[in-house]
Amino acid sequence: MKKLLIISPYFPPSNAADMQRIRMSLPYLTQFGWDAEVVTVDPAFSDLAKDELLLQSVPAGIKIHLVKAFQKKWTSKVGLGSIALRSLWFYRKKVNQLLKETHFDLIYFSTTQFPVCILGAYWKKRFNIPYVIDMQDPWHSEYYRDKPKEQQPPKYWFSYRLNKYLEPIAMKQVDGLISVSENYIADLKLRYPVIKNIPSATITFGAFEPDLKIADDNRQAFKSLLDPEFINIVYIGRGGADMHPAIAALFKAFKTGLDNEPQIFNQIKIYFIGTSYAPDGKGMPSILPLAKQYNIAENIIEITDRIPYYHTLVTLQQADALFIPGSDDPKYTASKIYPYILAQKPLLAIFNSQSPAIPVLLEFGVKHVYSYDQSPDADIHNFLKQVALHEIKDYPYNAEAIKKYSAKNMAGNQCRLFDTVLNGKN
């Protein structure tokens, strides 16, 4: 059995999107010949919301090593608030100790807290251990450079320059790449020709069916956010100006329906939940202002606070229909699509025409997948009307696609990449 050391600053019970791949892969890694241990930051040093139910999905035998981090209340005063930067020194010390005491065949960074990945080059040089990086998002990116300041992430000036400096330290020595988008890998290999021939694989997040049982067993613990007097269409995930083109296509069609058939369309409420990464109660609405431009704000509910992961699954199952908007970035792929698929609800997806999410959704048999730049007004209007009139009765998805994109299959794909990396080193 080969030994894998996973670096993931966030891990259950922290409710972070970037630890989901690891959480969903852990139950299956031994089936593919890999024994894994995880090094994560002690949740006490994380300011993310906690969801204790997430721990029920983590195999009992997995070794979890905790590291400390500098307290954010002190480091944020000098602009170092990210958990990666706060934990970097502690990661170095802890993993040095582990690598001295135990043989590991490979180190796997699966996180969007990218600065911690620079330690891969250090450990490779010191202990001769190869490492793989999972690119769930771009690290250094030019996407926001020409955007208005109000659309840029907080502290963008600093993070842009830091990322530009740190990324090559990790990437020029990396032995393998995994990504949710083929474009992310292509960009990196173009930027760093020295890695153009290393093993790489595009592997999406997987559909993890055990989560549905955990959610169902605990549904009474969650207060419903939806109004049973209305037809509820739900999106749960981040907002932002980059999603406005996709959301505007929905709002335009909805406005047309309200104007022409108000008795039907006024039955609909559209929910946008968890749209901000800010602490609870401090998020700024990014969707409601757009709804006001279309004069449909009475039918749009935006809840900026994030909700626990299993509350998300329960809410998706309570909805009458689901909506997934994509970014205006053509490289964007929505990792959240799999819980939406497993909910088996009528689903509307609107993306940039070049998004890699579109062919995946079509492979599942999702009938209402559109690109906002192809004027899908009539199609979106018809979907909304059918939902309001309860005309979409049965909505099964392609069982073979669900199997193909299962968390188990995705874990197997990761392990095959790991095997290829090791074979190239032998």
Image (cartoon, helix red, strand yellow):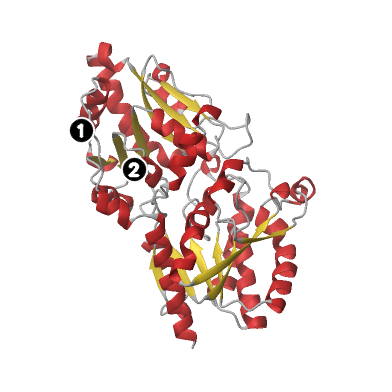
Residue 25 visible in the picture: yes
The residue nearer to you, when weighing 400 against 70, is: 400
Residue sitting at x 37%, y 45%: 337
Q: Position of residue 364 (x, y in %)?
A: 26, 48
Regarding mark 2 in the picture, which secondary structure is present there? helix
The residue nearer to you, when weighing 314 against 188, is: 314
Judged left or right of residue 69, residue 56 is: left
Local packing at callout 1 (Cα closer than 10 Å; few below 14, some 14-19, many 20+) is some
Earlier residue among tags 1 and 2: 2
Residue 319: quadrant of the picture: top left
Work out whether 123 lies above or below 163: below
Residue extending furthest right? 74
Q: Position of residue 372 (x, y in %)?
A: 29, 40
Indicate the amino acid at tag 1. Asp
Residue sitting at x 43%, y 41%: 212
Work out whether 74 lies above or below 89: above
Work out whether 1 lies above or below 25: below
Judged left or right of residue 313, residue 161 is: right
Residue sitting at x 45%, y 39%: 241
Residue 245 visible in the picture: no
Tell me the distance, in whole angstroms, between the alpha carbons under discs 1 and 2.
20 Å
Q: Position of residue 369 (x, y in %)?
A: 26, 42
* Res 63 label: none
Judged left or right of residue 35, residue 186 is: left
Indicate the amino acid at tag 2. Ile
Residue to which mark 2 is pinned: 341
Residue to which mark 1 is pinned: 379
Regarding mark 1 in the picture, which secondary structure is present there? helix
**Callout in the foreground (1, 2):** 2
